[in-house]
């Protein structure tokens, strides 16, 4: 019986794991975080309905609603502004739970606050990195990110994260709400895409908008140290020159950014296993993936819930891996092929000069099939998710 757990990493996965274990009756849980102080860093993140379900079942629904935006719809556009595909999202798509767009740092701070409330102020130990597999507990959970020390100890020959050859620029801008104020837009072609969505409720006629540009850039190496590299907007603006969107001025959005961060696009190959008898992995430590399809944070939350369920019911780490590793491995590989966002590339390849009727370029049935296939693969097809049993005890 697992009674004492040490978690490496106080990110989204580690903190959700602490809350999930506590809710499942495993209360001797300590989270060790390497940094001396946690700040609300980063930019936007989408948490999909199958993970929001888990956070709501942990009693965090009201807190999420206060700091996030319940995403209502998603639209794909060509760089000319022509509409390829639109679909409802969250509650509008028939889910029993919303999808939230949210500031990653605010989400982390909300989870941290909940952990300290429920498990006690000493449950999260800062400036306390886990550097190997030795620990004074029944189980060590490696939730320490893409450069996980726990993963490195389990697989010492793996090496650095794998660069895709792309660069990712992320920024946030305060501006007027666009479309419904709960909308996501993806604009792109075969070499570049721009994703835009609000990450905070509007206030005084303005809203915090997250945007991210992924571009083929022939990045060969992966930088060490702080990946939150700040750059000037002048480096990014030329890449959207001539791009059009009826809903908002793309150049003005980027030019007015509060901050712009540059990241390499990286992941790792799927692992053959995550666990020993007393150690396991979750989140980016287990399955780092490209941000395609909004699944990184989402899958980390579900990892935490399934692991807590497995431990509380004496089902063991094999049950946890059997439930989670095949799904996340498939998502990692699908995201390398652009996931549902492949329709941007297909539309560009088939009609590089634009089109008069998208149906002649990509029939509705094909667009629907691409969207549904990814939802099934990643575990959030609406009817299946709505009918699935809860991971709560």
Image (spheres, rainbow, N blue to C red):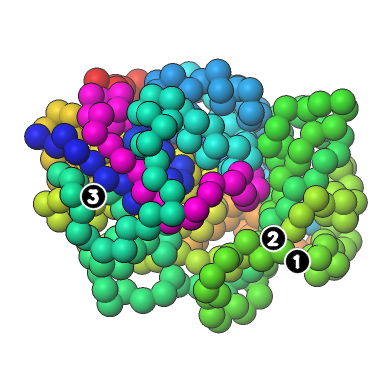
Q: Could you classify mark 1 by the number of other residues whose Cα lies within 10 Å: few (under 14), some (14-19), or many (20 or more)?
A: some
Do tag 3 and tag 2 residues touch (Cβ < 8 Å)? no
In this view of the protein, can residue 14 be seen by the observer?
no
What residue do we see at 39% from left, 45% from top?
125
Q: Name the residue under label 1.
A: 231
Answer with left or right where residue 236 lies relative to residue 264: right
Tag 1's secondary structure?
A: loop
Q: Distance between the residues labelled 1 and 2?
A: 6 Å
State which quadrant residue 92 falls in.
top right
Residue 261: assigned label: 2
Residue 248 image position (x, y, % from top left): 86, 43
Residue 59 seen by the camera: yes
- Drawn side of residue 13 relative to residue 100, left or right: left
Mark 1 vs mark 3, CA separation in Å: 37 Å
Query: Which residue is found at the position 26% from the left and 73% from the top?
Result: 156
Magenta-drawn stretch contains 208: no
Closer to the chain start, of discs 3 and 2, is: 3
Mark 3 to mark 2 CA distance (whole Å): 32 Å
In the picture, the quarter occupied by the N terminus is top left
Horizontal placement of 96 versus 279: left or right?
A: right
Q: Main secondary structure of the magenta part?
A: loop
Under tag 2, what secondary structure? strand
| Residue behind mark 3 | 140
Q: Do the residues labelled 1 and 2 touch (CB within 8 Å)?
A: yes
First reached walking from the N terminus: tag 1 or tag 3: 3
Which of labels 1 and 3 is toward the front? 3
Give the residue displayed 37% in from the left and 58% down from the top: 129
Residues shaded magenta: 20-44
């Amino acid at each position: 019986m697992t009674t004492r757990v040490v978690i490496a990493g106080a990110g989204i996965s580690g903190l959700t794991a602490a809350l999930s274990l506590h809710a499942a009756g495993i209360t001797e849980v300590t989270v060790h975080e390497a940094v001396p102080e946690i700040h609300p860093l980063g930019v936007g993140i989408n948490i999909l309905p199958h993970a929001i379900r888990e956070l709501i079942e942990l009693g965090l629904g009201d807190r999420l609603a206060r700091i996030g935006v319940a995403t209502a719809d998603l639209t794909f556009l060509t760089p000319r502004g022509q509409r390829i595909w639109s679909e409802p999202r969250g509650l509008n798509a028939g889910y029993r739970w919303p999808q939230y767009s949210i500031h990653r740092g605010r989400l982390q701070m909300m989870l941290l606050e909940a952990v300290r409330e429920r498990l006690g102020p000493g449950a999260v130990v800062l400036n306390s990195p886990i550097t190997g597999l030795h620990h004074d507990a029944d189980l060590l959970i490696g939730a320490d990110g893409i450069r996980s020390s726990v993963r490195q100890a389990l697989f010492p020959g793996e090496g650095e994260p794998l660069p895709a050859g792309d660069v990712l620029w992320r920024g946030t801008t305060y501006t007027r709400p666009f479309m419904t104020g709960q909308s996501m837009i993806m604009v792109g072609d075969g070499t570049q895409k721009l994703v835009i969505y609000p990450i905070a409720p509007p206030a005084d006629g303005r809203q915090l908008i997250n945007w991210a540009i992924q571009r083929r850039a022939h990045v060969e190496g992966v930088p060490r140290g702080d990946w939150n590299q700040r750059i000037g907007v002048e480096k990014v603006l030329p890449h959207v020159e001539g791009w059009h969107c009826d809903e908002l001025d793309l150049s003005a959005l980027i030019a007015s950014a509060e901050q712009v961060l540059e990241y390499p696009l990286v992941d790792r190959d799927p692992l053959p296993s995550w666990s020993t008898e007393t150690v396991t992995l979750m989140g980016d430590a287990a399955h780092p993936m490209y941000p395609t399809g909004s699944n990184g944070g989402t899958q980390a939350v579900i990892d935490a819930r399934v692991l807590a369920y497995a431990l509380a019911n004496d089902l063991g780490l094999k049950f946890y891996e059997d439930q989670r590793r095949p799904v996340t491995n498939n998502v990692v590989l699908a995201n390398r092929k652009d996931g549902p966002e492949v329709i941007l590339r297909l539309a560009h390849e088939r009609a590089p000069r634009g089109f008069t009727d998208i149906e002649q370029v990509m029939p509705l049935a094909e667009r629907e099939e691409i969207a549904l296939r990814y939802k099934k693969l990643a575990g959030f097809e609406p009817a299946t998710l709505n009918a699935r049993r809860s991971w709560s005890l």
